[in-house]
């Protein structure tokens, strides 16, 4: 068992008392201290936009009113300062162990909203990112789920990542996704999975690719919005 928090390195108390031992319940070791885990802002059980999942006092947020489409996303957490710091270490500095921080929660969240006939499809990273980082941060958060690898991200080595683009550039960017050769998704209902919903451009590009290749319905879920 880990003896220190994955995020702040403070000591963790994973000691089991007699009542827990006698209960024969499954042991779920702590990975993150209480102080760190409470620094993240959940969206669960809060009023959110029915389209993108953003914290919102109105039914459909201003961003989604501008999109004016039928795309639907669900999210677990707000993309705030605590979450930005998390992704700086996990995604951009490549600390793969940090996938464990939200993995169980995110997998449970996906399982709760997954419909019986839906196919889970993660957003892929491009070849250059996979080579330099060594992992897909999205699939790292999905361990234990049955998902299908059907998309290819064709972003070229000299083009900007989404986080390096302005909002306007993201919205104007042509899709970098294509369907893998030999994949048949005709008639499929698909649940796209990504780590962060910012403008929604990436998910919509992937959705368009899937629909053009025969998918019947595509919605998405993200760790944060």
Image (cartoon, rainbow, N blue to C red):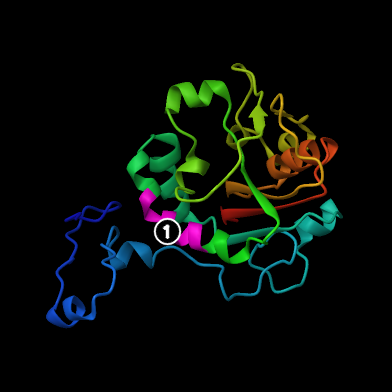
* Lateral position of residue 117 relative to residue 15, left or right: right
Q: Answer whether residue 102 is magenta in the image.
A: yes
Residue 39 quadrant: bottom left
Q: Which residue is mark 1?
A: 104
Residue 120: x %, y % from top left: 63, 48
Residue 200: x %, y % from top left: 70, 47
- For the C terminus, the quadrant is bottom right
Q: Residue at x 63, y 55 (%)?
A: 221
Residue 154 quadrant: top right
Q: Residue at x 71, y 57 (%)?
A: 117
Residue 156 quadrant: top right
**Magenta residues, start to end:** 100-108
Q: Secondary structure at mark 1?
A: helix
Residue closer to the observer: 21 or 9? 21
Q: Which residue of the protein is positioned furthest toward the top in this rendering?
A: 158
Residue 5, compared with residue 213, is above or below; it is below
Q: Which residue of the protein is positioned furthest toward the bottom in this rendering?
A: 19
Residue 196: x %, y % from top left: 58, 48
Q: Is residue 77 visible?
A: no
Q: Answer whether residue 12 is magenta in the image.
A: no
Residue closer to the observer: 163 or 70? 70
Residue 159, compared with residue 76, is above or below; it is above
Q: Residue at x 51, y 57 (%)?
A: 80
Q: Main secondary structure of the magenta part?
A: helix
Residue 181, compared with residue 144, is above or below; it is above
Q: Residue at x 45, y 48 (%)?
A: 143
Q: Is residue 170 visible?
A: yes
- For the N terminus, the quadrant is bottom left
């Amino acid at each position: 068992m880990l003896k220190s928090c994955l995020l702040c390195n403070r000591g963790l108390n994973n000691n089991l008392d007699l009542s827990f031992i006698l209960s024969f319940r499954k042991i779920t070791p702590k990975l993150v201290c209480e102080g760190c885990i409470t620094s993240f802002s959940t969206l669960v059980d809060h009023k959110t936009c029915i389209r993108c999942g953003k914290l919102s006092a109105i039914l459909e947020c201003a961003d989604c009113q501008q999109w004016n489409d039928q795309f639907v996303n669900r999210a677990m957490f707000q993309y705030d300062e605590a979450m930005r710091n998390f992704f700086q270490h996990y995604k951009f500095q490549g600390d793969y162990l940090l996938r464990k921080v939200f993995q169980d929660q995110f997998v449970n969240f996906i399982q709760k909203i997954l419909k019986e006939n839906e196919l889970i499809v993660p957003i892929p990273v491009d070849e250059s990112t996979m080579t330099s980082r060594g992992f897909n941060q999205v699939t790292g958060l999905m361990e234990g789920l049955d998902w299908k690898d059907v998309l290819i991200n064709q972003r070229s080595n000299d083009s900007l990542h989404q986080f390096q683009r302005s909002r306007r550039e993201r919205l104007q960017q042509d899709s970098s996704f294509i369907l893998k050769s030999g994949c048949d998704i005709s008639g499929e209902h698909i649940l796209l999975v990504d780590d962060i919903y910012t403008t929604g451009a990436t998910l919509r590009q992937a959705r368009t690719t899937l629909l053009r290749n025969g998918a019947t319905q595509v919605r998405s879920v993200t760790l944060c919005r």
